Image: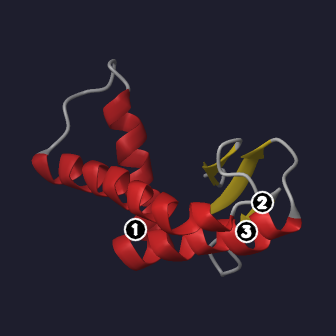
Amino acid sequence: MKDEIHSAEHLYTIEVEGRNVTVRDVMVAAFTYRIKLEELLGSPRQVAHCYRLWRRLERLDEPPMTRLDIKYATAWRDAHAQAWQVAQVFLTDPHTKTFVLRLAAP
């Protein structure tokens, strides 16, 4: 199940993956996770940008990144950890579920 961004620019969705995903998991927990990410990182565009850089940083075959890119990538990691802490309390079973950000197709 997923909580989609509803805006002129559909940049990403937040999905809840795991066992027995409920409406509450999606409507409350995923929504809270998304809102916290945007609160910490900025606009949906900035969330997507930081996430892309984090994914790039994880890949070994990518060219070197600038210090600013690394800063944004680590900002994603930190924001994800904080958003997880805030939102996981709304999951029906946080031990069997996780949030997954899926970027929209370019």
Q: Residues within 10 Å of mark 2 (few under 14, many from 20)?
A: many
Q: Position of residue 32 (x, y in %)?
A: 60, 74
Q: Earlier in the sequence, mark 2 or mark 1?
A: 2
Q: Position of residue 55 (x, y in %)?
A: 42, 38
- Point out the image quarter for the N terminus: bottom right
Alpha carbon distance from label 1 to label 3: 16 Å
Q: Amino acid at mark 1?
A: Gln
Q: Quadrant of residue 5?
A: bottom right
Q: Amino acid at mark 3?
A: Glu
Residue 32 in the figure: left or right of residue 37 = right
Q: Image point 74% across, 67% down: which residue? A: 3
Q: Quadrant of residue 81?
A: bottom left
Q: Amino acid at mark 2?
A: Lys
Q: Image point 35% across, 50% down: which residue? A: 77
Q: Identify the element where label 1 is drawn.
A: helix
**Residue identified by numbered label 1:** 46
**Residue identified by numbered label 2:** 2
Q: Nearer the viewer, residue 101 or 62?
A: 101
**Residue identified by numbered label 3:** 4
Q: Are marks 2 and 1 in contact (CB under 8 Å)?
A: no
Q: Earlier in the sequence, mark 1 or mark 3?
A: 3
Q: Nearer the viewer, mark 3 or mark 2?
A: 2
Q: Are marks 3 and 2 in contact (CB under 8 Å)?
A: yes
Q: Is residue 66 visible?
A: yes
Q: Nearer the viewer, mark 2 or mark 1?
A: 2
